Image (cartoon, rainbow, N blue to C red):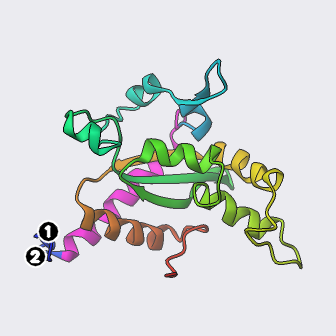
Amino acid sequence: MNYKLEPYPSNIHSLLTEAQSMSKEILKSLNFHDCPRIDDLYKKDNKGRIRRQVKMFEKLGIEPNSYLTKKDLSKGKVNELKGLYVMGEFEDDKVKPIYIGISRTIFRRLKQHAWGKNHNECTLAYLMTEHWDGGDQKVTRASVTDDMMEKAKKKIRTFNITFVPVENDYDLYFLEVALAGIFKTHWNSFKTH
């Protein structure tokens, strides 16, 4: 156990086997004819706010397993999803995984990726912008414009999306790296700061 009394897995090989099995299910889900796109799961309300479409998540069988704030936890209110999310894009008539993320607040995190205002909220859009619009000139946080970011956020909204609820933190971090390696996802990087 570590200092927080969190147990390490008894068999690390079983986690790798689980990742291999999980990768097949993820590919099936992303390529299913009814696989949602991110913009299917969120809609603007009459005040212009982006809202999660709870019924759509329910239709997918995605139920909250976590909480958004400590206040929610104290009230026993689960209203978030903890686990993996996998974004996919059509390539050669198939949906190919291009980004794997983990979060204890997936509902909020996806909204940030696709509609966030700051570079630290929509990190994938920022990364895509940096690589699309940079050309010979290096794009920096200071030089990225809202218009440049909007192009990437609109693209992200078209990605197919699937979810894998994972509650154990060790498993969650391990599976993100393992699945990114299995799929060779284009937009994942594990370079430290």
Give residue 51's mark: none
Residue at figure coordinates x 33%, y 43% from the top left: 69
| Residue that protrudes farthest toward the bottom in the picture | 192
Q: Residue furthest top?
A: 46
Q: Nearer the viewer, residue 193 or 98?
A: 193
Sooner in the amino-acid sequence: mark 2 or mark 1: 2
Residue 181: x and y, percent?
A: 46, 74
At x 84%, y 65%, the residue is 133
| First to last magenta residue range | 12-35
Q: Is residue 158 above or below residue 56?
A: below
Q: Amino acid at mark 1?
A: Glu
Q: Are marks 2 and 1 in contact (CB under 8 Å)?
A: yes
* Quarter of the rendering containing residue 173: bottom left
Residue 30 in view (yes/no): no
The amino acid marked with disc number 2 is Met
Label annotation for residue 6: 1
Q: Residue at x 33, y 49 (%)?
A: 82
Helix, strand or loop under label 2: loop
Q: Position of residue 116 (x, y in %)?
A: 62, 47
Q: In the shown orientation, is residue 100 left or right of residue 174?
A: right
Dot 1, crowdedness within 10 Å: few (<14), some or many (≥20)?
A: few
Look at the image and say whether residue 2 sits in the magenta stretch.
Answer: no
- Spatial CA distance of label 2 from label 1 is 5 Å
The mark found on residue 1 in the picture is 2
Q: Residue at x 66, y 49 (%)?
A: 117
Question: Looking at the image, how many numbered discs can be counted on the residues?
Answer: 2
Can residue 87 be seen here? The reply is yes
Position of 74 relative to 28 (above/below): above
Relative to 96, is 7 on the left or the right? left
Residue 138 coordinates in the image, percent (x, y): 82, 78
Image quarter where the N terminus lies is bottom left
| Side of 11 where 23 appears, left or right | right
